[in-house]
């Protein structure tokens, strides 16, 4: 990229309109609480991890809500990201659309209310077989262990929601699409339908590796979607697991990014972009055929309250610049800004307005 291209005077801010950014995923209500090591050990949790709840975790949800200082926040990885993108953009409202499945219950009403307050155009598939999904965020120091009980989120049905004309029209209105890898466990056929639409119409389809277990146990659906992925996000742990599963035989994150970029791709008009965050270390991104490091914003360790939404926030910031057709540098700068704001607060929450220029 030339310096002219990335200088502020030549930014072409695209006129934003409703439903330009489309997200689909697992809408969850986050239940976060500070716990101790004994709590983690009791339920066999690693301090920093994301897992799906099993039967042995049922009691965890009952126990965590009894802790003092429990906080409830609208969550779910993709929903967090589109919400942050909307927050970064501010106006117009409802640039971001979100699809997912909830239950007809109190938690579902909270999610609807929170999406509305965030000015996201959420269209939930509502069913009453399963309750609204929850995610327990068990916080110890700088670490957070996430246990997701998908429940209703797992009941998303392509034919009952995505395929309806009124909903598919919203998909068609978008030009940037983002789906976290977590949704591969729910409705890979819905992801493929959206991904193929993006590819066939030369629009931008983004995905996230989301968690090590996705590459390990949902590798087949992940690799079915990969040819349609224009931008792939992930963190250093997820990148390492992905590389191992694909037999890359390297733990050098720059090499992993490059090899991932070169995986087969359907729409050859767009070279795949791979972006790996590494917590406080540099973000790694493929720029053309090279791999470049982008330093994150400095932050005092004492100002870090909760790293839970950092990855989602990075993607949200990135997407907010992407829908405005800004340069890669700008997209990453916006991502770093959003993540820096979110880690100073509990849950994936944000102040009223961003202070980003």
Image (tube, helix red, strand yellow):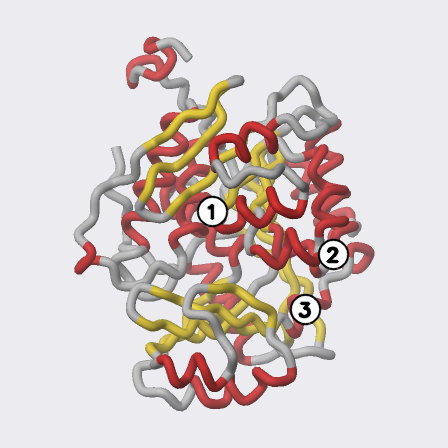
Q: Quadrant of the C terminus?
A: top left
Secondary structure under the numbered disc 3 in the rendered image: strand
Q: Is residue 133 above or below residue 306?
A: below
Label 2 close to label 1 by CB (< 8 Å): no
Secondary structure under the numbered disc 2 in the rendered image: loop
In the foreground, 328 or 275: 275
Q: x, y percentage for residue 326?
A: 42, 24
Q: x, y percentage for residue 275?
A: 48, 35
Point out the tag, 2 or 1, that comes first from the N-terminus.
2
Instruction: Please name the residue that numbered disc 1 is placed on.
Output: 235
Point out the tag, 3 or 1, that comes first from the N-terminus.
3
Instruction: Please name the residue that numbered disc 2 is placed on.
Output: 187
Instruction: Please name the residue that numbered disc 3 is placed on.
Output: 126
In the foreground, 172 or 82: 82
Secondary structure under the numbered disc 1 in the rendered image: strand
Question: How many circles with numbers are drawn on the protein?
Answer: 3
Disc 2 to disc 3, how far (Cα)? 16 Å
Between disc 2 and disc 3, the foreground one is 2
């Amino acid at each position: 990229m030339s310096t002219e291209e990335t200088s502020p005077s030549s930014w072409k801010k695209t006129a934003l309109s409703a439903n330009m950014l489309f997200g689909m995923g697992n809408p969850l209500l986050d239940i976060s609480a500070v716990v101790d090591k004994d709590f983690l050990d009791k339920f066999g949790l690693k301090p920093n991890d994301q897992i799906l709840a099993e039967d042995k975790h049922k009691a965890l949800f009952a126990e965590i809500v009894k802790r003092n200082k429990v906080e409830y926040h609208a969550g779910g990885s993709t929903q967090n990201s589109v919400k942050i993108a909307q927050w970064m953009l501010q106006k117009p409202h409802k640039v971001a659309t979100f699809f997912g499945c909830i239950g007809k219950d109190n938690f579902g009403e909270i999610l609807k209310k929170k999406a509305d307050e965030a000015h996201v155009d959420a269209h939930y598939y509502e069913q009453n077989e399963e309750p609204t999904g929850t995610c327990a965020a068990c916080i110890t120091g700088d670490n957070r262990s996430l246990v997701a009980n998908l429940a209703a989120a797992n009941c998303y049905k392509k034919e009952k929601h995505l395929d309806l004309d009124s909903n598919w029209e919203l998909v068609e209105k978008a030009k940037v699409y983002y789906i976290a890898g977590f949704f591969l466990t729910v409705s890979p056929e819905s992801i493929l339908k959206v991904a193929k639409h993006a590819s066939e119409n030369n629009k931008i389809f983004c995905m996230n590796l989301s968690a090590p277990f996705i590459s390990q146990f949902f590798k087949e659906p992940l690799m079915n979607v990969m040819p349609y992925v224009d931008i792939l996000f992930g963190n250093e742990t997820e990148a390492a697991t992905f590389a191992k599963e694909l037999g890359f035989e390297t733990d050098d994150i720059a090499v992993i990014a490059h090899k991932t970029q070169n995986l087969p791709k359907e729409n050859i008009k767009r070279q795949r972009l791979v972006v790996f965050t590494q917590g406080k270390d540099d973000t790694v991104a493929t720029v053309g055929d090279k791999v470049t490091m982008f330093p994150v914003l400095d932050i005092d360790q004492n100002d870090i309250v909760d790293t839970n939404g950092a990855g989602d926030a990075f993607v949200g910031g990135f997407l907010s610049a992407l829908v405005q057709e800004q340069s890669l540098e700008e997209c990453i700068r916006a991502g770093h800004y959003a993540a820096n704001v979110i880690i100073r607060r509990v849950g994936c929450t944000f102040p009223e307005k961003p202070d980003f220029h």
